[in-house]
Structure formats: structure tokens, C-alpha cells
Image (cartoon, helix red, strand yellow):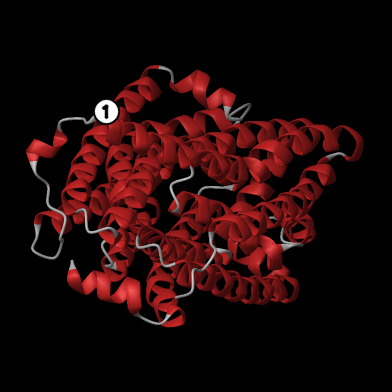
């Protein structure tokens, strides 16, 4: 652990941020590219409704897997601070509890997903001609979700160990595999949505198995020890309190998807859901660098908070926001210039080609400022302050975007859905900046001496 302490506690912040953020960005980028290619393949080889079906199903899969993500992020916050305070045993116990919690909860939710698949799909917007296609996809994808949940749990833990490159590899392997299998199952075997689902499920399994391999090998400083599987109430409570932020955020995103798909179907039909499916994939890919900065921020901030190095914590906050804002600006300029060309990659449908570019431009309108919100909520997670982290995380998707996406379309039709995104971004960013500024003034005072 000494090498990790030397790097996270003493190395220059700019260098540390790059070292942590670049692999995270590449990993997210490749995983997002995987989703984009998946959408391109089904859109070109199966049809427009297939895009709508994937748009409906993936939020369900990610809702279940977000249990693992929440446990991973909550536990990695504890692990980072424990390592910073030289409490190795607590780090090991936390890791064992994370594994146990993830597997139990993921299997329970997969069983529920199997028994209640049709009502769940209906709830998330699989209506009309979308339902049979979505059912074929969901019936296969659901079996890969426990592997995805384990991978989502393990990835932030690997970063907390100070091994961002291995976390990157864990996200790249399934992305590349899924693209290859998509071509084989959809194009050559002509298995349709079942083939697309099978490719996705196998790629999830490869990711989970790679994470398992990492922790069983000599590369990991955290070991899988059966004695640590016994749940410790105090550790579990802290994991859930911090990880609950991520789980509730994904829950809010799932509710948001229900509201969005309802509004889109009501005011624009199946085609509007397909439009959002394309925009959502582009958003995941384009925002990867910004999300990478926030992911890189977490282990560095958590370690230095645990080590009481307030000056370094303030510096990582400032530099993360600075770099993320520059990236956000570049992303927005790229969307403005290439919006038509981006949509053409997904489909040759005339309606989608004419309606999607302007809608996408509106959704991305305030991208340059979103890093402020991401770093604000990430700071409170890194500091182990669950309640403010929860509130700030819910600001955009839960508190602002859900009601806006429901109310605005009643007056402005489908355009109201698109405008709800930048409005929610502006409101949530203003509040986050004010709260973070107050926190820095009160609790990150630097004692001279």
C-alpha cells in the first residue's frame, strides 16, 4: 500500500488527475462506443423499432446492475479513505462485504425481472409494436446482468486501489467482444434481437469474469477472502448510505426514462422514442471525457480527504472542474458542427435524419457547465457525506428533469421534452456550485504551520 500512498498523497494533482481520468475516460468511451455500435447495427440491420426496443430495455438492465455500481462506489469511498488513514483491515472487510451484497441483490432482482418481464417492459415504454421486439431482447440480456453488476461493483474498487489501467481494460474487453458478436449473431446468423441480446449478455459475462480474474491474481492488493463475506452491519450501513446515492440516482434515471418514454410516445409516437434512443447513445459517448474526469476525481479526493490534506483536496476540485469544463466546451462545438453527420451513421430513415439533429443540439446546449455538477456531487461521495451527495446527485434527473419532461410537453409537444434537459442542467448546476462553495469554505480550511 506504500506505493499507492506515495502516489495519491504526494504526486502532483494535475499528473494524478490525468493518470486516473484518462483510463477511466477510455474505458467509458469504449463502453459507450459499444452501445453506439449496438444501436447502429440494430438500426441498420433490424429496423427503426429495434432502436426503440434497446432504448426501453437497457435502462432496466442498468437499474439492476446499478446495485453493483452503488455498492462499488460506496465501498470504494470507504476503501480510499481507509487506505489514506492506513486502515488496511477495514479496506479488506469492506471489499468482502461488497462482493456478498452485490451477488445476493443482483440475483434477487434478476429473478423478479424474469417473473414480471411484460409489466416491467410496459412500464418502461414498450408499447405497441415495440413490445415484442423488446421482449426478445430482454429475455436474453437479463441473464448477463449479474455479471454486469459484479463488474460495476469491482471497477471503482480497482480505481480505489490506484490501478486505473486495469479498470479501463475491464470496460474495453466487453465492448470489443460485443461488437464482434453483434456482427456474427445479427448479420451472419440472422438471429435478430435475440442475437443482439446474446451478444450483450456474453459481453457482460466477459467483463465480470475479467474483474474476478483481477482480484484473484497477484495484481490486486485487495484479496477475495471468504471470512470477509460475513456481513458487518456497520460496514454495510456505510456502503448503502454512500452507494445508495448511485442506486437512487439510477432509480431516478429509470423513473425519468418512464416519464420520457411516456411523453415521447404520447406526443410523437414510436419514432420519437427512436430519436431519443440515438440522442441518448450520442450523449453517453460524447460525455465520456467529462465522466472520466469525475471518475478520476473520486479516488484522489477520497484518499486525500482521509489523509486530511485539505490543500490537495481543494486543488483537485479546481483542476477537475477546469479540465472538465474545457472538455465540455469542445464536445458542444463538435455537436454543433457535426450533428447531421452523426445521425446519418445510425440510420437512413428520412424522419430520423430530419428531426434528430436539432433535438440533439437542444439537449447538449449547456454541456460546457455540467462538470461543475458532477464534481460537486462526487466530492461529497468521496468525503463520505451521503445526504448532500444524494441531494446533489438527484438534482438534475430527479428533482428537475422528471417534472419538466412531464409538464413541458403538455404545452410545447415533443419540443418540451428536449428543452427540459438544458433547463434542468442550468438549475442543478447553480445549486451545486453554491453548496460546494459553502462546503469548501467551512470544511476545507488549511491549517498553516
In the rendered image, residue 363, in percent from the top left (x then y), is placed at 73, 56
| Quarter location, residue 236 | top left
Please name the residue that numbered disc 1 is placed on: 233
| Quarter location, residue 429 | bottom right
In the rendered image, residue 305, in percent from the top left (x then y), is placed at 41, 60
Q: Residue at x 22, y 37 (%)?
A: 97
Q: How many other residues sit within 10 Å of disc 1, few (<14), some (14-19) or many (≥20)?
A: few
Q: Residue at x 41, y 82 (%)?
A: 12
- The residue lying toward the viewer, choosing from 211 and 12, is 12
Q: Quadrant of the C terminus?
A: bottom left
The vertical placement of 114 against 410, above or below, is above
In the rendered image, residue 405, in percent from the top left (x then y), is placed at 76, 38
Q: Residue at x 59, y 60 (%)?
A: 440
Q: Quadrant of the N terminus?
A: bottom left
Q: In the picture provided, is 154 more to the left or to the right than 443?
A: left
- The residue lying toward the viewer, choosing from 375 and 122, is 375
The vertical placement of 352 against 15, above or below, is above
Amino acid at each position: 500500500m506504500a506505493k499507492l500512498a506515495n502516489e495519491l498523497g504526494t504526486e502532483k494533482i494535475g499528473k494524478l488527475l490525468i493518470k486516473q481520468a484518462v483510463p477511466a475516460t477510455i474505458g467509458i468511451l469504449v463502453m459507450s462506443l459499444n452501445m453506439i455500435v449496438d444501436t447502429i447495427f440494430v438500426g441498420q440491420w433490424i429496423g427503426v423499432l429495434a432502436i426503440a426496443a434497446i432504448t426501453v430495455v437497457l435502462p432496466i438492465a442498468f437499474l439492476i446492475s446499478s446495485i453493483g455500481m452503488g455498492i462499488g462506489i460506496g465501498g470504494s469511498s470507504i476503501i480510499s479513505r481507509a487506505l489514506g488513514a492506513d486502515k488496511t483491515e477495514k479496506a479488506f472487510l469492506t471489499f468482502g462485504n461488497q462482493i456478498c451484497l452485490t451477488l445476493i441483490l443482483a440475483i434477487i432482482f434478476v429473478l423478479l425481472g424474469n417473473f414480471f418481464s411484460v409489466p416491467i417492459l410496459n412500464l418502461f415504454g414498450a408499447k405497441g409494436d415495440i413490445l415484442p421486439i423488446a421482449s426478445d431482447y430482454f429475455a436474453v440480456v437479463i441473464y448477463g446482468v449479474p455479471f454486469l453488476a459484479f463488474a460495476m461493483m469491482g471497477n471503482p474498487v480497482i480505481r480505489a486501489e490506484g490501478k486505473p489501467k486495469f479498470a479501463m481494460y475491464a470496460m474495453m474487453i466487453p465492448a470489443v467482444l460485443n461488437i464482434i458478436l453483434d456482427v456474427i449473431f445479427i448479420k451472419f446468423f440472422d438471429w435478430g434481437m435475440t442475437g443482439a441480446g446474446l451478444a450483450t449478455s456474453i459481453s457482460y459475462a466477459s467483463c465480470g469474469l475479467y474483474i474476478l480474474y483481477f482480484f484473484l491474481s497477484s495484481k490486486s492488493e485487495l484479496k477475495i477472502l471468504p471470512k470477509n463475506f460475513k456481513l458487518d452491519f456497520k460496514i454495510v450501513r456505510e456502503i448503502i448510505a454512500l452507494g445508495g446515492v448511485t442506486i437512487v440516482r439510477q432509480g431516478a434515471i429509470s423513473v425519468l426514462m418512464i416519464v420520457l418514454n411516456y411523453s415521447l410516445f404520447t406526443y410523437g409516437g414510436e419514432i420519437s422514442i427512436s430519436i431519443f434512443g440515438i440522442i441518448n447513445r450520442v450523449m453517453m459517448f460524447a460525455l465520456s471525457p467529462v465522466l472520466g474526469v469525475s471518475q478520476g476525481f473520486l479516488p484522489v479526493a477520497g484518499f486525500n480527504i482521509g489523509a486530511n490534506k485539505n490543500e490537495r483536496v481543494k486543488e483537485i476540485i479546481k483542476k477537475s472542474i477546469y479540465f472538465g469544463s474545457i472538455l465540455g466546451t469542445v464536445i458542444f462545438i463538435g455537436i454543433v458542427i457535426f450533428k447531421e453527420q452523426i445521425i446519418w451513421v445510425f440510420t437512413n430513415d428520412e424522419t430520423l435524419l430530419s428531426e434528430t439533429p436539432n433535438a440533439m443540439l437542444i439537449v447538449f446546449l449547456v454541456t460546457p457547465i455540467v462538470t461543475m455538477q458532477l464534481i460537486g456531487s462526487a466530492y461529497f461521495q468521496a468525503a463520505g457525506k451521503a445526504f448532500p451527495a444524494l441531494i446533489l446527485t438527484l438534482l438534475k434527473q430527479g428533482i428537475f428533469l422528471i417534472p419538466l419532461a412531464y409538464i413541458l410537453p403538455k404545452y410545447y409537444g415533443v419540443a418540451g421534452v428536449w428543452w427540459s434537459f438544458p433547463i434542468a442542467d442550468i438549475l442543478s448546476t447553480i445549486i451545486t456550485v453554491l453548496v460546494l462553495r459553502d462546503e469548501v469554505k467551512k470544511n476545507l480550511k488549511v491549517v498553516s504551520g
